[in-house]
Amino acid sequence: MTFEPATRPARSSGRRAPEARPAPPPRPRLLDAALVVVGLGFGATVGSTIIVETSSQLQAPGGVAMFLGNLTGMAGTYLALVMVLLVSRIPHIERILGQDGLLRWHRRLSPWPISLIVAHAILLTYAYAEASHSGLLAQLASFVSSYSGMLIAIIGLGFMVLAAVLSIYSVRRRLRRETWWAIHLGMYLALALAFSHELALGPSFVGHPVTQALWSIAWAATAGVVLAYRFGLPAYRTLRYRLKVVEVRRETEDVVSLILEGRNLDRLAVSGGQFFEWRFLTSKLWWQAHPYSLSARPKPPYLRLTVKAVGDHSSALAALAPGTKVAIEGPYGAFTTHARRRQKAAIICGGIGITAARALLEDLPKKSDPAVAWRVSTEEHAALAGEVEELVRRRRGTLHVVAGNREDVSLHRVARLVPDLRQRDVFVCGPESFVESMRQVLVGEGVPAEAVHYEVYAL
Amino acid sequence: MTRRTPLVSAAAMAGLGIVLLAHVGAEPRLLASSPSSAGGGSGNASSRGGSSSSGSSVSGTASGALEQYGYGELAVKLTVQKGRIVSATVTGLRTADTYSQQIAAQVIPMLRKEVLAAQSAKISGISGATYTCSAYATSVQSALDKLHLK
Ligand SMILES: Cc1cc2nc3c(=O)[nH]c(=O)nc-3n(C[C@H](O)[C@H](O)[C@H](O)COP(=O)(O)OP(=O)(O)OC[C@H]3O[C@@H](n4cnc5c(N)ncnc54)[C@H](O)[C@@H]3O)c2cc1C
């Protein structure tokens, strides 16, 4: 099965095109090891604030607030470092959790550092005001005038609180994604601005060159990881593969496939079900990167993605001119056949979710008897249906396409199209509401959580 | 997830335990009992102070030495523009106990004002905080020396 551009038919020479390599398998032990290191670091960070404390210090007025202020500051900042690492997309960890998993952890952790750091600021202002017998405002003024690094640290705190408030789901929902993202970058700035006052004034650091060095190394390493994996690696891959659009093919009324050509694609390790963040380098689109799955395994020198028009970016892609250069970040995602735990697989997808499913299907072995259940709004909207049918047939599987909108087709009905669901790995992909509801349905149907693998088409 | 929470918690307890154990038996970090061992009184600092020569074109920033003063230690960072001290901030402050911390928190803003007014390390001490003042002045002087300002 091929998707080579119509303008450049497959080479007729007997030589077989080089195959693309699958993504390396995830190694969950690495995550355990990383978590142990992170846990040790957290304990040591907390410990470092305890050992510099003395009982007379605690007993004196304001002493408890001072201690708690230091403790919350150190613990909060350490957790902020973990937050940064979680979104740095370290490939070995991303492979295990998937980008969505990393973001989920990042979100789940986020209330802790922010509230600890705010508590730190309040507690220490109070404690110093107590100590110097002045008011809170007078104390703030004296922080700014008399203590090193405090002015920029307070500015940093402002950025941090702003970015945090805008990330609260009910607020964030109302913002344009790009606006939110730009402000969210302020978090990095905030952490950098806070650094100087930590070393200059933190009781764990003043006069403790070893802790100072360790803390500096930890932050420098974190910054290095972010630079390497968010900027360096994508830039390297973009230059190495030099992708450009060669054809835009209409699949249905609102879905197009983009066929890209690149160099060295036989060296690209990617599995079916994975996605990239794509940046199309035109004057209007270059500044936005959006995630789209590969809708087929790469066929060097070609790649394909298939996009449904839902908003600005996805609608603009139909008008891309051949020759448009493309920058990539990825591949990302743990939604691959590496996730399988059982003999047989079922794939349940909603609408455009078929793109990842289609590529995943290609990675399933011959005669593996996959069961595919696909809910589409109407038959005409079933993009790539022919290819999916063919792939399922070659694997001796079954395909059920159910047309109808959410009200007409219950998800229970979709799930029950696969009779031996409980014996299979179940891969679910599609829009957020589809995947979330389907996961609940699967629990109800008795499919164990570890057999359910999913990719949501929204971050 | 379920397996990982205990893993992280156990590692955190271990990290905490290691740091605390490593600290056990180590001597107290500051000897609050011997203030006299900390270099000199305020007079010493004043005698070393001096007005910055007017018209000097020195600009820059320097951190003074971390001064031990028995109840704690502190360092002062100076910023100088065209020979004038424009800011004095504390870059390291550690005290043996909260009472000393309170005194330091109280006098540091005053000492800063004095330095900015005097444009030198020549500051009259504040009663009850002689050692803190002298450490502050000495650190200011060492920063001035680094900047080659008198
Ligand atoms: C892992 C993954 C794989 C995907 N694969 C495909 C695919 O193969 N084919 C396909 O058509 N669509 C896919 N999507 C969805 C696609 O990314 C969005 O439809 C697209 O980004 C919408 O952008 P827009 O500007 O057109 O619409 P907007 O109006 O800006 O957004 C519409 C919705 O898309 C989501 N979205 C917008 N921008 C982003 C972004 N930068 N990152 C993540 N989500 C965003 C938002 O949640 C929003 O609700 C995938 C999404 C993810 C997360």
Image (tube, coloured by chain):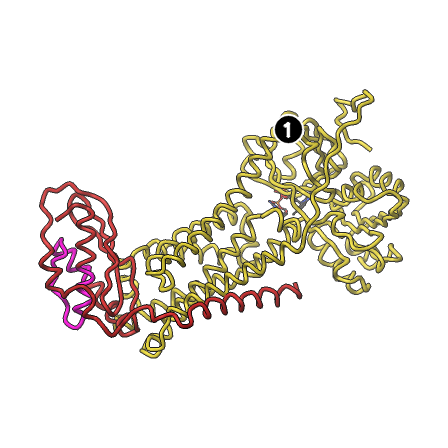
Chain colours: A yellow, B red
Side (left or right) of A31 relative to A10: left
Residues packed near mark 1 inside 10 Å, few (<14), some (14 to 19) or many (20 plus) = many
Placement of A378 over or under A244, stated as above or below: below
Magenta stretch bounds: B111-137
Q: Specify the quarter for ligand 1.
A: top right
Side (left or right) of A394 relative to A329: right
Residue B97 at x, y percent in the picture: 30, 73
Residue at point 60% right, 29% down?
Answer: A325
Front-most of B21 and A218?
B21
| Image quadrant occupied by the N terminus of chain B | bottom right
Residue A366 at x, y percent in the picture: 87, 42
Q: Which residue is at the far front?
A: B25
**Distance from mark 1 CB to nearest ligand 1 atom below 8 Å:** no
Placement of A167 over or under A61, stated as above or below: above
Residue A423 at x, y percent in the picture: 85, 58
User: Would you identify the image quadrant in which residue B121 lies?
Assistant: bottom left
Residue occupied by mark 1: A244
Residue A315 is one of the magenta-drawn residues: no
Front-most of B74 and A227?
B74
Q: Which residue is at the far top?
A: A13
Residue at point 33% right, 60% down?
Answer: A207
Residue B37 at x, y percent in the picture: 20, 68
- Label 1 sits on what residue type? Lys
Front-most of A176 and B112?
B112
Dot 1: chain letter: A
User: Would you identify the image quadrant in which residue A414 lies?
Assistant: bottom right
